[in-house]
Image: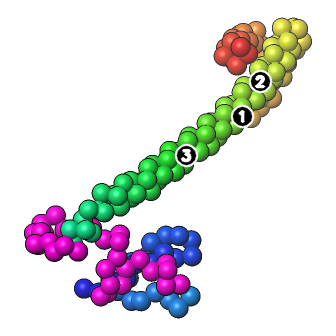
Amino acid sequence: MAQYMWLDASGRKVFSDQPPPANIPAKRVLQQPGKATTSQTTDVNEKPSTESSADAATSATAPKTAATTAKPEASKDKDLEIAKKKIEEEAAIKKKAEQEKVDAAKADNCKRAKSAKTTFDSGVRLGHTNSKGERGIMDDATRMVETKRLEGIIASDCK
């Protein structure tokens, strides 16, 4: 099966059964039908053939090429670690920003609750709207319930 492999403009590998576009330079073509490449590996099930003297010389240099291919893998691992760190840092920054928003909301709630508690503690007559939408004067029982609710808000948000 004829298969082409090349690096596109952004550096990604592209696999296709069609030749690369004309704007791709020949040096970026990694594989094409009928030509062997250095990046190809042999099949595990493939049986080794008898070596000629030229093949023996080539296989003597094989460990050197294996060592050089390990370096790009190491750089890929390093690049992956750098990318992972960057993602973790971005997540930490995002989490910190969200925590700051929550803290700001709690500070605002605390401020409002303290202000309302001061008003309730002053003893001034307060009006309220009941469930029917009618306006009335707050009695002592309702004032106590509302004071307890405000104290709960102050206890949770004002730390």
Relative vertical location of residue 134 with respect to residue 121 in this rendering, above or below: below
Task: Name the foreground residue: 55 vs 48.
Answer: 55
* Residue in the picture at 29% in, 88% down: 34
Q: Earlier in the sequence, mark 3 or mark 1?
A: 3
Residue 80 appears in the figure: no
* Residue in the picture at 62% in, 43% down: 90
Q: Which residue, given by chain and number where applicable, does mark 3 sit on?
A: 82
| Discs 2, 1 touching: Cβ within 8 Å | no
Residue 76 appears in the figure: yes
Label 2 packing within 10 angstroms: few (<14), some (14-19), many (20+): some
Q: Position of residue 75 (x, y in %)?
A: 48, 52
Image quadrant occupied by the N terminus = bottom left
Q: Quadrant of residue 86?
A: top right
CA separation in Å, label 3 and label 1: 29 Å
Residue located farthest toward the bottom when viewing the structure as drawn: 22
* Residue in the picture at 49% in, 47% down: 78
Q: Earlier in the sequence, mark 3 or mark 2?
A: 3
Of badges 3 and 1, nearer the viewer stands 3
Label 1 packing within 10 angstroms: few (<14), some (14-19), many (20+): few
Kind of residue at badge 3: Ile
Q: Which residues are magenta?
A: 25-54
* Residue in the picture at 71% in, 14% down: 159
Q: Is residue 6 magenta?
A: no
Kind of residue at badge 2: Ala
Tell me the element at label 2: helix
Numbered badge on residue 101: 1
Give the prevailing secondary structure in the magenta stretch: loop
Q: Which residue, given by chain and number where applicable, does mark 2 sit on?
A: 107
Tell me the element at label 3: helix
Left or right: where 85 falls relative to 133: left
Q: Earlier in the sequence, mark 2 or mark 1?
A: 1
Q: Position of residue 98 (x, y in %)?
A: 66, 36
